[in-house]
Image (tube, rainbow, N blue to C red):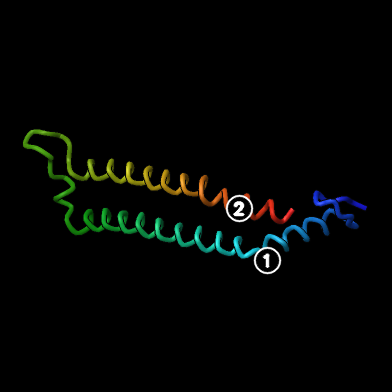
């Protein structure tokens, strides 16, 4: 006999884990968490993909713009600056996702987990 955290006696840990898993899966807040997290991830992924596609499209269809210097005698080209901007953009998007995941999503997951135990 195994005693789960909720005090009930089970025949095995596997049975105990399945009971907790089933409680989590049946909680409507868990379904809401999964939907909200997936929706947010898809939106951010589409935004990042659109920026990268735009960058590559400019490189393919207007390569002269990428090699054009920013000012007359500068060795800095628009393509180089665009690459730096995309790196900063990716860093910011990762930060936005991490902040929401560590705040809103983790809090909701913790509530669901505590309710199941």
Q: Mark 2 points at which residue?
A: 109
| C-beta proximity under 8 Å, tags 1 and 2 | no
Q: Which residue is drawn at 61% across and 61% down?
A: 30
Q: Residue at x 37, y 60 (%)?
A: 46
Residue 22 position in % (x across, y down):
73, 63
State whether residue 35 is above or below residue 91.
Answer: below
Residue 69 position in % (x across, y down):
12, 40
Quarter of the image for residue 91 reads top left
Q: Residues within 10 Å of mark 1 (few under 14, many from 20)?
A: few
Residue 54 position in % (x across, y down):
26, 57
* Most distant residue in the right direction: 1
Q: Between residues 79 and 89, which one lies in front from this camera angle?
A: 89
First in sequence: mark 1 vs mark 2: 1
Q: Residue at x 63, y 52 (%)?
A: 111
Q: Name the residue under label 1.
A: 26
* Most distant residue in the left direction: 72
């Amino acid at each position: 006999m195994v005693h789960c955290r909720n005090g009930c006696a089970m025949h095995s840990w596997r049975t105990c884990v399945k009971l907790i898993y089933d409680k989590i899966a049946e909680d409507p807040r868990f379904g809401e968490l999964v939907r909200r997290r997936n929706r947010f991830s898809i939106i951010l992924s589409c935004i990042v993909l659109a920026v990268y596609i735009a960058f590559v499209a400019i490189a393919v269809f207007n390569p002269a713009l990428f090699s054009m210097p920013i000012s007359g005698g500068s060795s800095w080209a628009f393509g180089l600056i665009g690459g730096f901007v995309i790196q900063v953009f990716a860093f910011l998007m990762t930060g936005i996702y991490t902040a929401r995941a560590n705040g809103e999503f983790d809090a909701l997951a913790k509530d669901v987990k505590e309710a199941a135990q």
